[in-house]
Amino acid sequence: MTSRLVSLRVARFASLVLTCVLGACTSDDKPPGPSSRAPGVALLQIENAQVAPGVPVRLRCTADDPDGDRLVYVFDWGQGGTLPQSPEVDSGTTSGVDVPISREGTYQARCRAVDTATTVGAWSPQLSFIVGEPPPDGNRGLQVEVVGQGRVTSTPSGVDCPGTCSVRHSAGTRLTLEAVPASGWQLLGTSACTGTGRSCELLLDADKVVTVRFAPALDTALSWQRTGAQLPTSPEWSPDGTLLAAVDGSVSTPGMLRVWDATQGRVKRQTAAVAPARFSSVAWKPGSGAVVAVGLSTGSVAVLDAVTGVTLHEWTVQAGNVRALAWSPDGTRLATATDASKEVHFWNPTTGARAGQTLTAVDKVRRLAWSPDGVRIAMQVGILSRWVEFHVVGTQGPEELLPDAAGFAWSPDGTRFAAGFQGEVKVYSTAGYRVEATHAGAWGLATQVDWSADGRWLGVAGSAARSLFVLDAGTGAVVVDASQVTTDPNAQGYDAFRFHPTKLQFVVVDDLPETLDVFTVDSGEASYSRREVLSHRYTVRAAAWRSSGEVLASSGDEGRVRLWNRAGDSLRTLDGHGGQAVRALAWNTAGTRLFTGGDDGVINAWNADDGTLAQLPIRRETTPALEVYQVAPSPDGVRVASAMGVTTVASHRGVIRVHHVQSGAELFRFPDGSRQVLSVAWTPEGRLVVAYFDKSWDVWDPVTQVLTSVASVADMTSLAVALSPDGTKLAFGGRPGLSLWEVSTGRQLAQTPFAFSPETLAWSEDGRRVAGGGSGGQVFVWDTSVPSLPATVIGFHDNTVSAVSWGPGGNLVATGGRDGALRVWRFTP
């Protein structure tokens, strides 16, 4: 990865106040800007899991910031109103709040971090606490809630359940819970412990509620998926070029290994390391179809089947993060280097035994490359000052050292190599290390150099922002200038460049903003085409199926709208919101136009078939700057309703407008813009229903211009709302769970006893089911024909579920998440 200097920002953070209600904070996450990466996933601790009414609950939160920024932690347990926040602390420091709660009950709490640039991190997993008087007998109770299909047992005995079960033990008892997924299912996690390990130990010092989450295995439930990535690094083609692998470089994620179908760009496999380890590097075994070696942050190396994710062998190599590894050309040895040592070690990848003399570099090694004959190994060394060392395997001390060399690549036959310098790429003869040719170019420091498999081309990526060149290896002439124009002032050079093993293609990677693109070069025409592999860089904000079910639209924080066919192939990208987050998507009834709304305050209408704008955008006023987070065209296509807001202005948190589609003229504005809006939708008869976070809603009749308000009897905060297809019912998601309400009367029709808090919801076409998800990552389907609203887990994300759309026909459910993934699940009633 290219070394980057972290810019120092002046902290104007001492008086940060998050003036947003619960619904606003949930729906108003900001993507990390170009100069600020999002804080990592927070970890919540509750120091007293059971308290008497009025006694403060001590909530503590911890998170790391990748930029080292100071943090404030925000806490939520379903109380509504302004979210409490901790004092500002250093990254990685624990802080919290003490909150007295008078109402007895079981609560679910979570926390998140906000950095000095107000960039918001992901919510922590939820933990439960109890407000109530402790029992007089000195015993404490444990309630285990199993969500999904699996079994949980305990030592000492007493817990043995799917479903919900409970046990009582003496205060201070230590219990170990063992979670075993059912066949075809996998364990997602246990609320009392971190990671996905099956065993979880806890101290029963108070009454506790523990949730154990299971989900169907991806191979059985998933139709297709597209993903983003977290600071991607180490892109590598499989030996036959059919697969492409990369790992996440973020310290706040599990360092996911992702494997894509190299032709279609669909994700074949995502594999996470077992906490606390992270994957940090990857290399394909030569001549193999699917075997990769991965370096881990804990000083170990694992050999995996990249298609199945199964670990074939794992062993410890040395202390530190294994950030460089390389297979010998015959696949019999593996070289490794960590960030804690200057040593390079050699291993038998089958047994994990040492397979050669340790070599020592002048400084820590960034990348390793065996010569094609297996005699030498080149080491790219240094961070600020860079050089390349050449060692003969089995011989101590470098044979040669090239100062100031940044990029490096062997020629396919190993008789030559290329090295990148400031404004130059030099070609050397391996015998004698003599310069044969010097090629100059406008790429700045040539940080990335690669040689095509047929030996005809040299690829160069430089420190100059987004510079990319393909050179004739013999003459140095520029065959293709594939440099990308960028308006990002923080954009720098690409972090990696790798030629395809059989085609005139190459992949480039940049960690920030997250980029993984495949370029196809036509040397005869001196042209190229570019394909984006990552679907969305950060959170997938919205997903919407076309009425025909043949096209799925998705949008994300990076400001793009992507269209996919039913099989998951990319159709086109719509870019009309100036790089700002697109939070709202909606098709017209005929499926001919797609309406989009973004943080730029603009509503666009797109022609679905060719991706062009159907008309001039409907624009906002500039004071205050309002962000569009809901959009809904009327059934007749004449009007479009939208919800706009800005959390920092109390009177403009939920501004509701209705515009004429053709002219853009404003037809109606709701009088109160202070409440957070969770849903804007039209009934089949053409009435507009607007639902709010406090379980109230308004109904506007465009014919009579009458606005009717309905308030439910509930006093709990909602996180998501969806209007039924027939316009008669509203599904509210929040604490304590999912509930259904009659639109005309405000009467509650059904409520689930399951205390999961959905944050996004969608009805099936026939109105019999509701799909949704939330901070736990599970995707649920609720049966609305039964008063208890029984739930089925159909899928999952590795972070909060942020978008859901039910495909026509009812057998596909599309979801998006804060993990950057867009997933389409098969559903069989």
Image (cartoon, grey):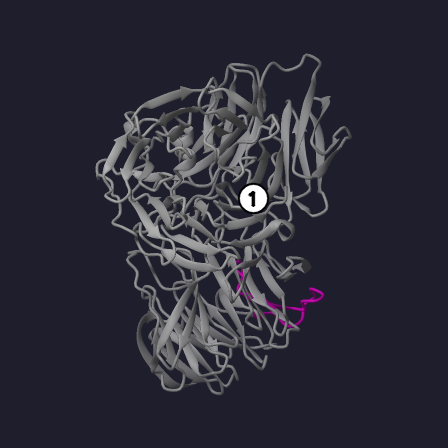
Image quarter in which the N terminus is found: bottom left
Query: Could you tell me residue 404's position as x and y percent?
Result: 38, 72
| Image vertical order of residue 474 relative to residue 635, above or below | below
Is residue 375 visible to us here? yes
In this rendering, position of residue 23 left or right of residue 786: left
Query: Could you tell me residue 476's position as x and y percent?
Result: 36, 83
Image quarter in which the C terminus is found: top right
In this rendering, position of residue 736 left or right of residue 201: left
Residue 406 lies within the magenta run? no
Residue at the extreme top: 136
Labels in figure, total: 1
Q: Amino acid at mark 1?
A: Gly
- Secondary structure mostly seen in magenta is loop
Residue 346 lies within the magenta run? yes
Query: Could you tell me residue 391's position as x and y percent?
Result: 53, 76
**Could you say which is closer to the camera, residue 798 or residue 131?**
798
* Residue range corresponding to the magenta coloring: 335-359
Q: Secondary structure at mark 1?
A: loop
**Could you say which is closer to the camera, residue 572 or residue 807?**
807
In this rendering, position of residue 626 left or right of residue 372: left
**Could you say which is closer to the camera, residue 81 or residue 142?**
81
In this rendering, position of residue 216 left or right of residue 462: right
Q: Which residue is mark 1?
A: 810
Q: Quadrant of residue 149?
A: top right
Is residue 322 visible to us here? no
Q: Quadrant of residue 637?
A: top left
- Label 1: how many residues lie within 10 Å, few (<14), some (14-19) or many (20+)? some
Query: Could you tell me residue 356's position as x and y percent?
Result: 65, 72
